[in-house]
Image (cartoon, rainbow, N blue to C red):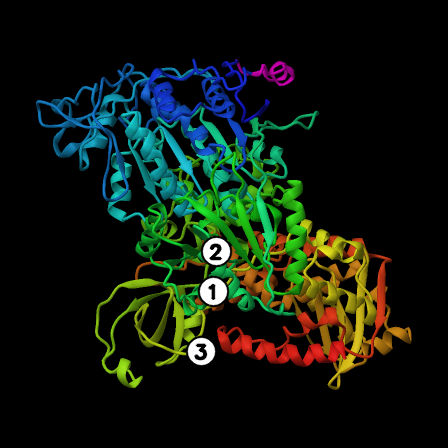
Amino acid sequence: MIRNASPSNTEAPTPEAPGAESARAKAPRRKARKGAAPQTEALPETFRRWFAARGWAPRAHQLDLLAAARAGRSVLLIAPTGAGKTLAGFLPTLVELAEGRPSRMATTAHARARGPGEDAAAEGGERPGPATPPTASRSQDGTISPPDTKSATGIKSRPGIASPDPARSKAHGRAERITEPAAALPPHGADADAARPDARAPGAAPFARWAEQARVSPLHTLYISPLKALAVDIARNLEAPIAEMELPIRVETRTGDTPASRRQRQRRDPPDILLTTPEQISLLLASKDAETLFSGLKRVVLDELHALVTSKRGDLLALALARLRALAPGLQCVGLSATVAEPDDLRRYLVPQSDPGETGDTPRADLVVAHGGAAPDIAMLDTAAPMPWASHMALHAVPDIYAAVRASGLSLVFVNTRRQAEFLFQELWRINDDNLPIALHHGSLAVDQRRRVEAAMAAGRLKAVVATSSLDLGIDWGNVDLVINVGAPKGSSRLMQRIGRANHRLDEPSRAVLVPANRFEVLECHAALEAVRAGAQDTPPERTGALDVLAQHVLGMACAAPFDADALFAEVTTAAPYRALSRADFDAALDFVATGGYALRAYERFAKIRRTRDGLWRVANPMVAQAYRLNIGTIVESPMIKVRLVSARGAARSGVAGRVRWGGRVLGEVEEYFVESLVAGDTFVFAGEILRFEAMVEDEIYVSRASAKEPKVPAYAGGKFPLSTFLAAGVRALLAAPERWASLPPQVAEWLELQRARSRLPGRDDLLVETFERASRHYLVTYPFEGRLAHQTLGMLLTRRLERAGLKPLGFTANDYALGIYGVGDMGHAITQGRLSLADLFDADMLGDDLESWLDESSLMKRTFRYCAVIAGLIERRFPGKEKSARQVTISTDLVYDVLRRHQSDHMLLRAARADAATGLLDVKRLAEMLARIKGRIVHQPLARVSPLSVPVLLEIGREGVGGDAEEALLAEAEDELVRAATN
């Protein structure tokens, strides 16, 4: 079903039966009178009064989601920022819980016997609604609690809900087993109202009490977001309607930052609504009480769905959803998104998949689209400062950024990497003569520091926050007046998402400024501006589920309970990314978890699950389950080292540290490889401060505050976004249209005119290849505009071919826009003499034998395999007393990689790594598309000297990732020299 909901007032939809979508999609929508509120009969009186008290009226798409929920339908909502997506997603849950309409009486999954004499059952009646309850409260840990009254027995209970009978609980809080027959389940989509006793009390007893009364968990709705900060933000925003309507609803968050004690308590005493992340859901599903915990689950709300589904994290979540549907039949999924290129991909993700049959149609969720919203007010920074030819830090624009911050209310200053965040924060503070309150926020900072920044934003105490993607999804912290995006956006959808953080209201424009760091980034920002104004989206296409993620999920299911392979295969293939999974691939993943594969089956440590006599698969031993829970997830980061702030005697006066004083607070974490480059006395920037490295103690480094002119800036692996195909095409189109250059900054337009005069410009669909000599070296520079990853792979393959041609290449360098190869042989002369054919050099057959030969010895391929091995559980990074350093993980995976290549070339992990290579570190798929595009369209331009367009990529040669002002100064010196050569 597709519904287009205008933000203007319309008549409220009425609930409909499943299967009525075609009639509804074609039926005209009758608009209400201008200024009239939509009909709200679908809302309970409490909610109507709440909307009216705020001067609001529910929007049409919010009522549409309520109607879909009552019809038992899953739905995808696409709505612009400020349209109330979050409230729309939660409205059905709030209404159902307020009306005392729990999800179901019992589930077949829960009724399944867990052991001899442990037959499960369910019983109960409808929960009465509250009668004039007191105000809800929020605890210090962020838990939103329902109003409590105290019964005569001294046991706290919710208003209108009977206290549990203490006589029914056995000693030590254990639940009395109930052996009555289980109630029949309603079919999918049917109204499945049933009882949910909701008594709450601390300790282990509460779980026993609700379990003994109905054997149905009180957990009603899961909210899943890609960011921990987003879950905390939603909890804050849910607090208002729950408290103001005095609803008997408890909301809690569960992320990696949640204390272990609270996570354990949440399993014993679940809240009504749990706000969490994909990893936490998989962790809960791998527990032995998962069947009980999710027995009453009715709904899953997936926020920023477009950001969840485009990675292996989305694969893991899809498998978790398949499991949740098995545990809670009739489960509804609600997807929320503002930036979607292909809605059907997300609609499939939300519902169980089945064999498409002859028609090829696959099941899809309903679609509700909310149109409207003010167009964003977005512009590129107009600066008089000289525009760098090659830089990534935008140092030239810092005074202009500071001026924009000073002239605005709260500003969010977005950058693309944590390293950029630390650097820019320091530069802003260096010129902060007005002592403006400016903060820093990124994922490596300690959780308490992030929470302090978030609280200050919400309270309006800050003037600006420098942040990475840790704040760019759905966050509504305070009244953000301006978004400043430093660096190229790399994608129009990502830029739209960040712009939407400003002025989080539908009918007022969001204000944003783009700050390109160099001249190529100006072209990319211009293309992004045009895409935003046209409303064009470039979210990645639907992906196929990864086998290493499947292996992790298989092990998790064994940790929860013994499983039947046939049943698990049937369950897995209902997940959208795995709907085309073959039984052979599933069996290969199962065999990997059970034995490690043919080449590794002799090693006992790789046998993580075993088959029982009854044919079920169970976890081999408790240690395996413990290791699984410590290593769950698909985000593979370098090992992190805690940074603890201490004091060192004498350091402040003499600059030489004395004896380190123990204690101090943790500032956050930096990657292990960066720590390995430090010696005592080195200074670096972190958490917005200049720190001095004092010592390393176990898994922590001790630092003290210091002052230094040229501190290092930590770099983090995997922090760079790739240039989207859509924006790359926009940049090529801009270069090929000189009539459009008038809208570019004069410095950049002059640069392109100079390129046209000295060489030529790349065409929209052809490939320009320049050759020239400089400083006794010969250069070949080409401009594919396909992103750094694809260019690096292309450089590897071209240098192999040039080596075979006897042209002695020395190396190559690449950025998002160009590729430069340098060597001893005169490549330009070889091309003009016909000894080197560009058509042959760039032939797509390089992706055959050349690629295979290079992959066999490539460190990038080994790194890709390493990531797959960690995700699949072959190598465990974390285990008490056995944590592995980055070097140990590398050695272990490299050894296994070599063994598998020799003895089992079709091993599941090798196939998973090759699949990743197509779109991951090597981006082979995009490279193949580029080679097909430029076939027969390669243009060679021999030159006597460096071209203006080649200067940025040549400046990448020999750069070291030290960071700080020293790097920028060296880059400026090299730039001056190359610019003189290109322009004189």
10 Å crowding of disc 3: few (<14), some (14-19), many (20+): some
Bin the neighbour count of mark 2 within 10 Å (Cα to Cα): few under 14, some 14-19, many 20 and up: many
* Residue 289 at x, y percent in the picture: 31, 36
Q: Secondary structure at mark 2?
A: strand
Q: Is residue 24 above or below residue 376?
A: above
754 or 842, which lies in front? Answer: 754
Q: Residue at x 63, y 79 (%)?
A: 974
Is residue 468 visible from the viewing direction of this image?
A: no
Query: Residue 373's x, y, as percent?
Result: 56, 34
- The mark found on residue 413 in the picture is 2
Disc nearest the viewer among 2 and 3? 2
Query: Label 3 is placed on what type of residue?
Result: Glu
Residue identified by numbered label 3: 710
Label whose residue precedes the other's in the sequence (1 or 2): 2
**How far separated are the C-alphas under marks 2 and 3?**
23 Å
In terms of image quadrants, where is residue 428? bottom left
Up-down relation of residue 31 to residue 576 (above or below): above
Of 827 and 118, the residue lying toward us? 827
Whole-percent x, y for residue 405 in the image = 46, 56
Q: What secondary structure is marked by label 3?
A: loop
Q: Answer whether labels 2 and 3 touch (C-beta < 8 Å).
A: no
Q: Do labels 1 and 2 touch, CB within 8 Å?
A: yes
